[in-house]
Amino acid sequence: MEEEENPNTSTSLSDPSTTEVLVNDLTTAPATNLPPVLPPIPTVPPVAVATPEPLPQPIITPATPPPIMPPIAPISSIPPPVPRPLAPLPVRPPVIRPLVPQNTEANGSDSDSDRDAAHGSSADYEISEESKLIRERQEKAMQELLMKRRAYALAVPTNDSAVRARLRRLGEPITFFGEREMERRERLRMIMVKLETEGQLEKLLKAHEDEEAATAAAVGEGDTDGPQEYPFFTEGSKELLDARVHIARYSIVKAALRLERERRRRNDPDEDLDAEMDSALKQAGTLVLDCSEIGDDRPLSGCSFSRDGKLLATSALSGVAKLWGMPQVNKVTALKGHTERATDVAFSPVQNLIATASADRTARLWDTEGSVLRKFEGHLDRLARLAFHPSGKYLATASFDKTWRLWDVDTGVELLLQEGHSRSVYGICFHHDGSLVASCGLDALVRVWDLRTGRSILALEGHVKPVLGISFSPNGYHLASGGEDNTCRIWDLRKKKSLYIIPAHSNLVSQVKFEPQEGYFLATASYDMTAKVWSARDFKPVKTLSGHESKVTSLDIVGEGNLVTVAHDRTIKLWSSRSEKENDMDVD
């Protein structure tokens, strides 16, 4: 077969018509038939050009249309956003207009926006019964709150006979079974508020006028059974008057000396107050634990240095107070006499006398030998803190009977019983001039009293929980307070407001003390088992004293910055600066 096909191919090459047929046969023929045809092909040049070109043509033609389509697509998408904001504008008025009167009648709104909102809420949402009940409860709670605010603003008689007479004139029962005096007074207060809110104020005023007329008639006839007018103050004793005069004279001299000293230091070019404060703060920043001693079998509640710093007094929940020799913390004597736990202890600033407060509702005055000199009785509940007046002649005690009292140290006579706190009074402190005294209590309130007149001159509100510690600064115008809200507040008595809030501890602040010489720094004790020292310039932290294993209940500062802390772990810890410690070692 091969010999017959070869002559045919050689004779047909000269004919151009046969060349096209052969080319097509070659392109469609299988690969096995190519070798016998290749030898005669090189003699014809057009055949070699026609075979490779048909293959790339189908690849080039489809690549041209795709790049034309992308620019056309976004052009068609641009116009649609233009009519979208215009579409709802003509639709809204015809839908809302017919329903406007109903919404205005129901909601009482005058503006178009209010009517639109009311229509939308009523058309789209339905208020459930649970939501209605919640709303009614909220409205009721708001009404009760407003009534309480109005009630505390009303003047209600404090005398029980006057309260009964007012209830009788208002047509109310004068008493209920088992009702006490305070409950009866609160009932009268709420009745008066209810009459005022209901618009029956005329009835209330008429009852008040009748009461005044009856009182005047009773006074004119000499009748003592009816309601009587009482003075708005309580007349004091002759001893209290003498004490106020003595305190006024003492405080004027002390204030004049303080102001003269401040002027001299300010005008003296050699005095550098900033350098002195920096030195004091640097020394306070080097406080380290110098000594630790077991103070009692029960947790310790208070501590106080003597005026020269050679003695330390501590009180414990066992009811025993102890004296310790410093700085070795050697036990000197025990002060035994209280029948309940001792809550606080204080050294006299003038003499070596010690005062202790106890839960047995008494305070006692001791000498350094352990003998009882005075016993102060009169409080109706347990005592909390106590403090000596700077003159050393008077003692103030705070009690859980919502009062604080002033006592004469020499005679043991109760000079003043002061009310003013709505809950228990816990802390008390005297101004360094002796003219003011500050009290704090569980009502989260700090009150400043003028001992020369007996008036409450400041009521400092800011703490959100009970206030437990309070201290005056030696500069005369700063007051520090700490409480259960874990903060220490600095009050400016000149501006009558809070100057700075120190987020002092992670637990309640149990005691606050300014450095007694110049007030360059402030120390706080807390139930987070630490005591901290703060700068009195910018109230930034200077030192954290960690070492106690339980709640720190009290602290005291003496001299150039020596500090002592007592805690529920029954230990007394003395903190001294490193420079003083090194000097003592050099002397030894």
Image (spheres, rainbow, N blue to C red):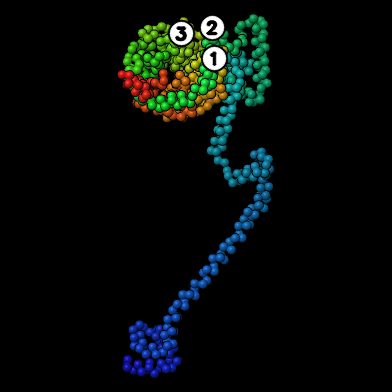
What amino acid type should be assigned to the residue bearing mark 1? Answer: Ala
Name the residue rendered at 50%, 25% in the picture: 490
Residue 427 image position (x, y, % from top left): 47, 19
Q: Residues within 10 Å of mark 3 (few under 14, many from 20)?
A: many
| Residue at the spot of label 3 | 409
Name the residue rendered at 44%, 84% in the picture: 50
Q: CA distance from mark 1 to mark 2?
A: 22 Å
Residue 3 image position (x, y, % from top left): 32, 93
| Quadrant that contains the N terminus | bottom left
Q: From this viewpoint, is residue 515 visible?
A: yes
| Residue at the spot of label 2 | 242
Name the residue rendered at 62%, 44% in the picture: 117
Asked whether 82 or 186 is in front, the reply is 82
Where disc 2 sits, the SS reads: helix
Asked whether 99 or 576 is in front, the reply is 576
Q: Earlier in the sequence, mark 3 or mark 1?
A: 1
| Residue at the spot of label 1 | 256
Marks 3 & 1, CB-CB < 8 Å contact: no
What amino acid type should be assigned to the residue bearing mark 2? Answer: Asp
